[in-house]
Image (cartoon, helix red, strand yellow):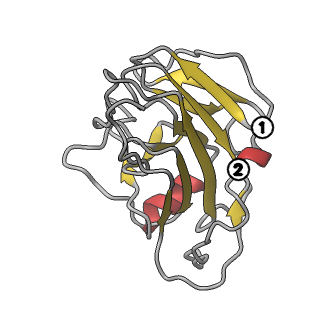
Amino acid sequence: FGMRTSAVLFLMIILGCDRSNGSDKLPILNGLDHWVVRDAKSRHQLSPDNANEPIEFADRGPLVWYFCSKSPIKQPVDVYSTSLQYQLSHRNFFSDSAKFIGGNLPDLVLEGNGNALLLYNLTLSWTYRTIVNVKIDESAPWLLGGQENLWQPRAPPARANRDTMTVFLSRPFAVCIRGGYYSGAETTVLQPAPPRATEPPRRTPPT
């Protein structure tokens, strides 16, 4: 492990407010049976289709890449205020020269119809495992993607409100989950969140 003995072993991220006993969640891994890995800059596909769980990809660095659903989530699906849950396991990223590439790229992207919703700060550096549980509504800090580059926030940054969320979610969209974070070689595994993951409540969509 070299000099890095202060690594965080486990991180759970829960985004969304107004907590109660809601139980609806978006079955991201079960509902999307084909995933590919894409480079963050070129969106070039780096892996063949993968229909297995868990989904794993390794690089030799430095690359920022994403697990992306090959097919969009199609409507009609009542997605508003559901909970998106997944787990990332980070392996083989320790070396004396490795650096965490946080940067200004999002950790989670929902993309469709020429628009995108972006979420940041879901993974800390030197973390072995991250469990994400995020509300797909305006209670989480979703940012609107830019007009020239959907995977960059608008200038100035604009947070998605209830109207923009419901319009976006009424159409098919794809899911991209960041897996590449380090300047050196790394392996990241994407899989469903464990059943014990706390779930934020579901909100009522606007009428």
171 relative position to 128: left or right? right
Element assignment for label 2: loop
The location of residue 58, given as percent across then percent down, is: 58, 21
Per the image, the residue denoted by label 1 is: 53
Q: Amino acid at mark 1?
A: Glu
Q: Amino acid at mark 2?
A: Pro
The location of residue 207, given as percent across then percent down, is: 58, 77
45 relative position to 149: left or right? right
19 relative position to 75: left or right? left
The location of residue 130, given as percent across then percent down, is: 53, 50
Name the residue nearer the viewer: 179 or 143. Answer: 179
Circle number at residue 14? none
Question: Dot 1, how many residues are within 10 Å of its Cα: few (below 14), some (14-19), or many (20+)?
Answer: some
Q: CA distance from mark 1 to mark 2?
A: 8 Å
Per the image, the residue denoted by label 2 is: 192
The location of residue 23, given as percent across then percent down, is: 71, 74
Disc 1 to disc 2: CB gap under 8 Å: yes
Q: Residue at x 53, y 82 (%)?
A: 19
Name the residue nearer the viewer: 49 or 160. Answer: 49
Q: Earlier in the sequence, mark 1 or mark 2?
A: 1
Question: Dot 2, how many residues are within 10 Å of its Cα: few (below 14), some (14-19), or many (20+)?
Answer: some
Q: Quadrant of residue 125?
A: top left
Element assignment for label 1: loop
For the N terminus, which image quadrant?
Answer: top left
Q: Residue at x 37, y 49 (%)?
A: 120
Q: Quadrant of residue 83?
A: bottom right
Q: Residue at x 69, y 64 (%)?
A: 25
Above or below, 78 against 179 in this view is below
153 relative position to 79: left or right? left
Name the residue nearer the viewer: 60 or 52. Answer: 60
